[in-house]
Amino acid sequence: MPATEPAYKYELHLPAGFDPNRKYPAIFTLHGKGSNERNMYSLVSPLSESFIMIGIRGNLPLGSGFQYYELKSLGHPIRELFDEAVRQLDAFIDYATDKYPIDPQRRYLLGFSQGAILSASLALTMGSRLKGIVALNGYIPGFVKTEYPLQSVRDVSVFISHGEYDPVFPLEIGRETAAYFQNRTPHLAFKTYPTGHEVSLDNQRDFVNWLKADTGLEE
């Protein structure tokens, strides 16, 4: 059963003309290290008329922002905190699906950087409980691939993008992540952009159109 109180604070955006008697597709956004849920809303706002949007705030303070887990060093999460984040986010998604009129067959995660890392990891642990993920400038930790109980992602839609000049996670990491998913799902889109560790307008346009197509909302 979903927890009565979620582990995370969150920001809820309901579609225009919201009807509580119908089910909606949902996008759960996961921000980057030191950011917050409000910074993610602008990325998905073009979809606000069709989706329930839930911006999940990391539960660990970091400077003026938040994070979902801490690092031993760049690219190396503290395992106990990462494991806990994966468990708590899984439970949160079920909590929100129970609380709001979310279609459980059309649940998406969209994350940037640390949020992309968690989105990719949750795709592998939740499998077909998710309809799809958008992972922007992230990767999959090695221990997730080798030690987690992985589910099939054959029916999961995956959009991965990476900045060609990303100084935090080099482009090759994005290519490796795409290659990993390519062997596991036929529903993969991988795109690169002439940017750094950021999301360009072209990138946003592409994943917005991809989400519309994947959910059957294309005009």
Image: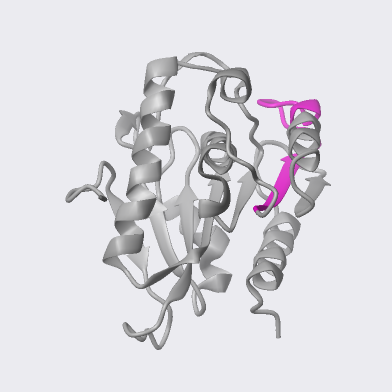
Q: Is residue 89 left or right of residue 151?
A: left
Name the foreground residue: 172 vs 216. 216
User: What residue lies at 45% left-to-right and 75% top-to-bottom?
Assistant: 24
For the magenta stretch, what is the residue range? 156-173
User: What residue lies at 65% left-to-right and 65% top-to-bottom?
Assistant: 211
Horizontal and vertical percent position of residue 98: 30, 62
Q: Is residue 154 left or right of residue 149?
A: right
Horizontal and vertical percent position of residue 38: 41, 54
**Height in image: 78 above or below 179?**
above
Can you see residue 64? Answer: yes
Name the foreground residue: 21 vs 26. 21
Can you see residue 65? Answer: no
Query: Where is the C terminus found, in terms of image quarters?
Result: bottom right
**Height in image: 179 above or below 130?**
above
Q: Is residue 5 left or right of residue 42?
A: left
User: What residue lies at 35% left-to-right and 53% top-to-bottom?
Assistant: 94
Corner quadrant of residue 206: bottom right
Horizontal and vertical percent position of residue 123: 57, 43
Corner quadrant of residue 34: top left
Q: Which colour style is shown?
A: one colour
Residue 162 in the magenta stretch? The answer is yes
Corner quadrant of residue 124: top right
User: What residue lies at 34% left-to-right and 45% top-to-bottom?
Assistant: 91
Horizontal and vertical percent position of residue 139: 65, 31
**Height in image: 182 above or below 189?**
above
Name the foreground residue: 86 vs 9. 86
